[in-house]
Amino acid sequence: MASVRTLSALMHETGSDLTIHVTGRQWWWQIRYKGAHGTSDVLAANEIHIPVGRRVRIELATADVIHSLWIPNLHGKTDLVPGRTNVMWIEASRPGTSRAQCAEYCGLQHARMALPLVAEEQAAFDAWLARERLPAPGEAGFHRARGRVGRPSPLAVEPAARSRDG
Ligand SMILES: [Cu+2]
């Protein structure tokens, strides 16, 4: 009995950890917060927000080539490898904005893959998440999600990239 209770306590603790899904793309970061209790996911781009004082699980995947997420103040480099999901855990002890960046050369606009990591008090984080949250899932929500995520897509427009960089 004791061990069962311990296990369920652990599961509860694990369940209360925040998980953020980060997908590396040429050349931007897609950030997804899984909606709790039937609410829709929150999609953001090129910006990671975390609450202070909570362990945050970051699941890292790539939509194309190998990227590597590096948050110098909080964590070493962790690769984003095609066909795999890698995990890093971070926790910020106080509010503030850190710089994170791709640490693996991933093509012409690799240097553009820098992003702020904003650590804020739980209430401020919740407010940010509420602002970013999409309307109920459905066709409209889906297209709005694509629009949101597509916002930084000028970076990914091939001809512009070619003429600007070389
Ligand atoms: Cu990259």
Image (cartoon, rainbow, N blue to C red):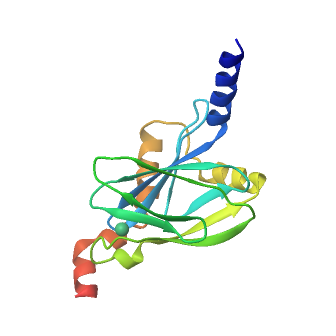
Q: Which quarter of the rendered image does ligand 1 occupy?
A: bottom left
Q: Quadrant of the N terminus?
A: top right
**Who's the residue at 64% across and 23% down the image?**
7
**Who's the residue at 75% across and 56% down the image?**
124
Relative to the observer, which residue lies in front, 15 or 27?
Answer: 15
User: Considering only vertical position in the picture, is 65 above or below 164?
Assistant: above
User: Considering only vertical position in the picture, is 128 above or below 94?
Assistant: above
Relative to the observer, which residue lies in front, 32 or 87?
Answer: 87
Give percent across and percent down for residue 61: 38, 51
Give percent across and percent down for residue 63: 31, 54
**Who's the residue at 49% across and 36% down the image?**
137
Relative to the observer, which residue lies in front, 23 or 150?
Answer: 23
| The residue positioned farthest toward the top in the image shown | 1
Q: Where on the picture, by quarter, is residue 5?
A: top right
Give percent across and percent down for residue 165: 27, 86
* Left or right, residue 166 beside residue 127: left
* Left or right, residue 2 beside residue 117: right
